[in-house]
Image: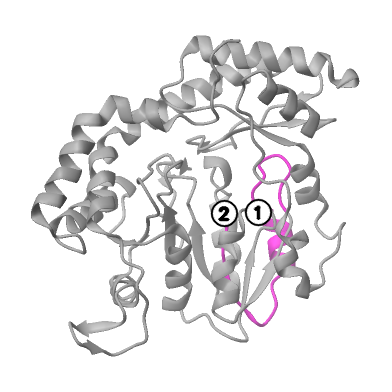
Amino acid sequence: MPQKIPLVDLQAQYATIKSDVDAAVAGVIASCRFIGGPELVRFEQAYAEFQGARRCVGVASGTAAIQLALQALGVGPGDEVITTPFTFIATVEPVAALGARIVLADIDPATFNLDPDRLEAAITPATRVILPVHLYGQMAPMDRILDIARRHGLQVVEDAAQAHGATYQGRNAGQWGDIATFSFYPGKNLGAYGDAGAITTENDALADTIARLRDHGRASKYTHDVIGYGERLDALQAAILGAKLPHLAAWNEARRRHAAAYDEALRHVPGLTVTPPMAGGTPVYHLYVVRVAEHRDAVRQALNERGIGAGIHYPVPLHLQPALADYGWQCGDFPQAEAAADQVLSLPLYPEMTADQRARVVETLREVLAAVPAL
């Protein structure tokens, strides 16, 4: 059997930057400065510059980034935060943790992102924040979302966990809302070698508040003027991210080339729908996702059996998650999210992927789809 093609290949990436990463890790170990220090400062400055932001604050994970961002904006009991039902649960866990109420609005089926029309219809007097997600590396329509936010006096937090370097109308993910949050989970376009995250913002006061909250609310070493958390980005992860960041633009461009080749090869395959870039947007293809009209789960299983590492992101929308059952949402409440959850299929895509690997994915997918009735 031919060698397996994984959904993402972190070993292939490490092989290309091994000397840089090893040197960065060795430098931190030699210094024995594992919390804070120059590596963290350097990465925060470099990532702020990459994103075109005034400030970057490194934190322990993408989930921590959302929680600290919402808390810095004053979100708490009695407030509502509107977001999409079609995302990983980490988007809404911080809302619940802060005692606020999760409000969902359905997605645009063409982009998988929050539908502005449904978003505006979900606003109530208790709404405090809009939390759009730039899913799969394609940005949400931030011009329309910001227009809604301004008209209703709402704040915007961008969940950009999958959108490092994505743009819309010439502006980066993170340059639209009051705060943007990023995850550096290992499989992300810019991934650490463990959990890591960050926020970016133009607002110094918000950045300073988040920096304090991530570090136990310290005003000085043993003076704590607010209750905070141990949600710091450690120096080892900061050093690794700093070593990888100079490669990110090239990696994103490689992802775009692979995605364009997939689009061309799969555009007219029966039973399959590709997702073109939104007008005005430049995605970074954290994932390459297609829709399979019928028997999606059987198609995925058949691909996996043939050595193709296909995946599903995400098979259960938030309103049908057992952890959120107390909200009383039912099947049918968000039909576009449910349809996407039943049909989406993620195909292998990573910068180091070869043209031959990509061609094998396409050929195998065509064969499997042709055999769908018999699967």
Q: Which mark is residue 133?
A: 2
Would you say residue 331 sits in the magenta stretch? no
Tell me whether the residue at label 1 lies in contact with that at label 2, contact meaning CB atoms closer than 8 angstroms.
yes
Please provide percent x and percent y for residue 190: 38, 42
- Residue 255 as seen in the image, left or right of residue 119: left
Q: Which residue extends farthest front? A: 1
Q: Quadrant of residue 263?
A: top right
Magenta portion: prevailing SS class: loop
Q: Is residue 90 above or below residue 129?
A: above
**Residue 178 visible in rendering:** no
Horizontal arrangement in the rendering, residue 7 relative to residue 302 (left or right): left
Rendered-image quadrant of the N terminus: top right
Q: Nearer the viewer, residue 115 or 213?
A: 213
Residue 95 rendering spot, x and y as whole percentages: 57, 73
Q: Which residue is mark 1?
A: 114
The foreground one among 283 and 254 is 254
Q: Of marks 1 and 2, which one's residue comes earlier in the chain?
A: 1
Label 1 packing within 10 angstroms: few (<14), some (14-19), many (20+): many
Q: Secondary structure at mark 1?
A: loop
- Amino acid marked by disc 2: Val
Disc 1 to disc 2, C-alpha distance: 7 Å
Residue drawn at point x = 70 percent, y = 67 percent: 323
Q: Amino acid at mark 1?
A: Leu
